[in-house]
Amino acid sequence: MLKISVNKLDELFALIASKQTLYIPADREAGVAEYKKWEQGMKLSNALNTVRSAKDFFFPQTENLVDFKMEGKNIEVIDIRQESEDFVVFGVRACDARSFTILDKVFLVEPVDSYYKNRRDHGTVVTMACTRPAETCFCGVFGIDATEPEGDAVCYNDGENIFFKAHNEKGQKFIDSVSSLLEEGDTSKLDEVQAKTRDILKKLPLANLSTDSFGGDKLMENFNSDKWGELSESCIGCGTCTFVCPTCQCYDIRDFDTGHGIKRFRCWDSCMYSEFTRMAHGNNRNSQLERFRQRFMHKLVYFPSNNNGEFGCVGCGRCLSKCPVSMNIVKVMKALEVK
């Protein structure tokens, strides 16, 4: 397997950035990482994951869709779409990599979302296998192997070297583009690191969390559970869980009058907000209980019902660490679990 010394990461990043835009997880403050456009001297974060997911690169929080120019009764529609630049997202973890396959099932089915597809076509996802999973991680519950992440290409870190493997043609093209810095390497130490990581994953507090009580065939019994009232009481409807979630895909579309034209844009929305799905007649989910239930029913029941059993959660643990009242999908799963 091809490798590069961890001491030569700056050279690697410089080479990648000379060919296309590069984004890496970088420290924002102590223990907090976010994806940033690489610049000379920027270091790859040692944090397990970023505060916000890599979803932003393909489904940004806000985006201009189309412009309108109005003169009297005449309306000119201005298509502002442009081809995305080629870019590389380096260091994506296994949970976020799986989230892309979930988002693809939403945005790449007919009618295809051309904005999302444009970014997917031009973006190369280079994942990084985990070596230090956190207690909030539970990706394995959804069949994700943190030591063998998906993506176009994958990297493995044995502490001394970074090893590369391609998963598809785009990944191979990426490896070929940096091959001048790579050399063949012995993976014996890497095998030990992966084995140790898998042992850690088995011992994590949430490793044995069960999904047996959920799925498309459990719709009515979960929907009608008397547990929703108690579970939703502490939720303040802030939407933090949806904004840090790598698989949430809801958005709102608004028109904004700039004074010299109209801009139509979309921005992330949250099923936890009181105005979510509000129509002319009003809102069909008027209580926090109904909105709270909608979020978790979608992840655990509705999505798998429509996608061959695949759940809408990837076990990244962000909602566990970021919810201000410590209410999250794990507590919901445990409360609704059939004993």
Image: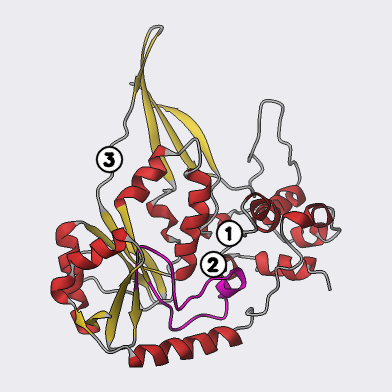
Asked if residue 131 is among those painted magenta in the image, a careful observer would answer: yes
Residue under the image location 66 percent in, 65 percent down: 329
Of marks 1 and 2, which one's residue comes earlier in the chain?
Answer: 1
**Residue 322 place in picture, x, y as percent:** 56, 66
The span from disc 3 to disc 1 (Cα, nearest Å) is 31 Å
**Residue 306 place in picture, x, y as percent:** 65, 49
* Amino acid type shown at disc 3: Glu
Q: Residues within 10 Å of mark 3 (few under 14, many from 20)?
A: few
Name the mark nearer the viewer: 3 or 1: 3
Dominant SS in magenta: loop
To which residue does mark 1 refer? 241
Residue under the image location 53 percent in, 38 percent down: 252
Q: Secondary structure at mark 3?
A: loop
Q: Are marks 1 and 2 in contact (CB under 8 Å)?
A: yes
Residue 261 vs 93, above or below: the answer is: above
Q: Is 206 in front, or is 280?
A: 206
To which residue does mark 2 refer? 318
